Amino acid sequence: MVSWSALGRSFGINLVKNSLKSPNKIQNVTFTTAKTLKGSHGERTMALQPSRWQWHKFKDMLHFYMMVGLIPAGALIFYCNVFIGPAQLTPIPEGYTPKYWEYHRHPITRFIARYIHNNPQQDYEKFMHFLDEEQQRIKLRALEKEIIKKMAERQDYQAYYYKPMVNKYLRMNKRTGDELYNRIGDDYKD
Amino acid sequence: MVQDGNPPDDNVFRAFCNALYNTVDAPVTWFRETVVEPNQKKYPWYHQNYRRVPTIDQCYDDDVVCDFEANAQFKRDRAVDSEILSILRQRYEDCMMYEQPDHATKCRSLWDKYKSAEEAWFIKYGDLGAYGDARKAYMKQKHRMVWERRNGPLSDLTK
């Protein structure tokens, strides 16, 4: 409960306060539990308080790593905006097809569009080719299914029972059979 | 709102307001005019012109490529029409802000134009749902025309 921890805290503080009756000076340094302001002139105080080292270290690291990112990025963005600047919108001149990155305004966007992304028209056409190929496969499969269904329905086509053959295994078996015949002969009784 | 200072402003209050504004604006404007603008390069950028492709009603029903292109064109057209509607709405709203509280009479023509444009937009693109594509819009048109043939016209725009 809140009241118990308050009791514990005041217990600890009272212990320290009881031991620090008067301003406690050891070798000209005052030890105090009071909040100290860091002044260079004024008494030298040693604050008896829990360490704030981890908090200070965290702030240090946070600032450092943020600046490692922010300063180069900020410098790049400043350079792009001040020394290159955004483009002006102009009508397309006669007989000229602009490159695909020339449809963007900001220099960084143009850079990304030119060197990192693909040409959107190329992507569009590649996707349409892929769609067309898949559509042909769909049509082929649908046709095969239809034919097999009809053959099963009408039972009038012998190819329904046709299994595709690979001659490789037939040749191997024939070769084995010939070798056995050469060794053993046709040992069978009619 | 930065003053050129040609006739110095007599109005003390206005001059004070301008001075207050310029405490922030003047250094920024100076920096832009002396440092930024001379150093910027001038080069063009263009507006992409897309070719018109066959619409969904001109495609065979099993032609996936035609369907994809018609759909892409439909989405572009919808974006353009939405922007047009937005511009008309902005015009009415600017007029309304300026003419308050007489906006009902003074801005009437802008309001009527906006309302008919909005109705037309809704007839074509409205109520198609999140996955609305060209085919759904085409079917919506077909159903609307069938309904209108049985029950008479829905609005002035569809007569």
Image: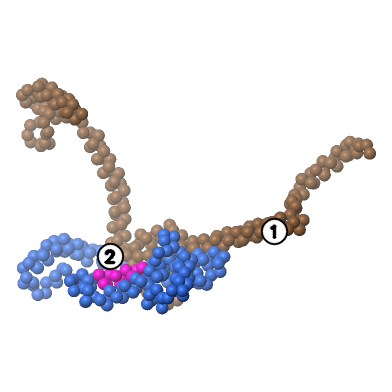
Chain colours: A brown, B blue
Q: CA distance from mark 1 to mark 2?
A: 77 Å
Q: Which mark is residue B41?
A: none
Q: Quadrant of the N terminus of chain A?
A: top left
Residue lying at the far front of the rendered structure: B151
**Residue B47 relative to residue A79: left or right:** right
- The structure residue drawn at horizontal position 29% and vertical position 46%, both measured from the top left corner, is A66
Task: Measuring from the top left, give residue B91's x and y in whole percent.
Answer: 27, 72
Which quadrant holds residue B42? bottom left
- The structure residue drawn at horizontal position 50% and vertical position 64%, both measured from the top left corner, is B68
- The structure residue drawn at horizontal position 44% and vertical position 58%, both measured from the top left corner, is A117
Task: Measuring from the top left, give residue B59's x and y in whole percent.
Answer: 53, 70
According to the image, label 2 marks what residue? B39
Question: What is the chain identity of the residue bearing mark 1?
Answer: A
Task: Measuring from the top left, give residue B94's x and y in whole percent.
Answer: 23, 71
Which quadrant holds residue B48? bottom left
Q: Is residue A16 visible?
A: no
| Mark 1: amino acid | Lys
- Which region shows up in magenta? B81-93
- The structure residue drawn at horizontal position 31% and vertical position 55%, both measured from the top left corner, is A76
**Residue A36 relative to residue A60: left or right:** left
Membership of B66 in magenta stretch: no
A95 or A120, which is in the foreground? A120
Dot 1: few (<14), some (14–19), or many (≥20) neighbours within 10 Å? few
| Mark 2: amino acid | Asn
Asked if disc 1 and disc 2 are in contact, CB closer than 8 Å, the reply is: no
Q: Is residue A124 visible?
A: yes
According to the image, label 1 marks what residue? A150
Circles 1 and 2 on the same chain: no
Q: Main secondary structure of the magenta part?
A: helix
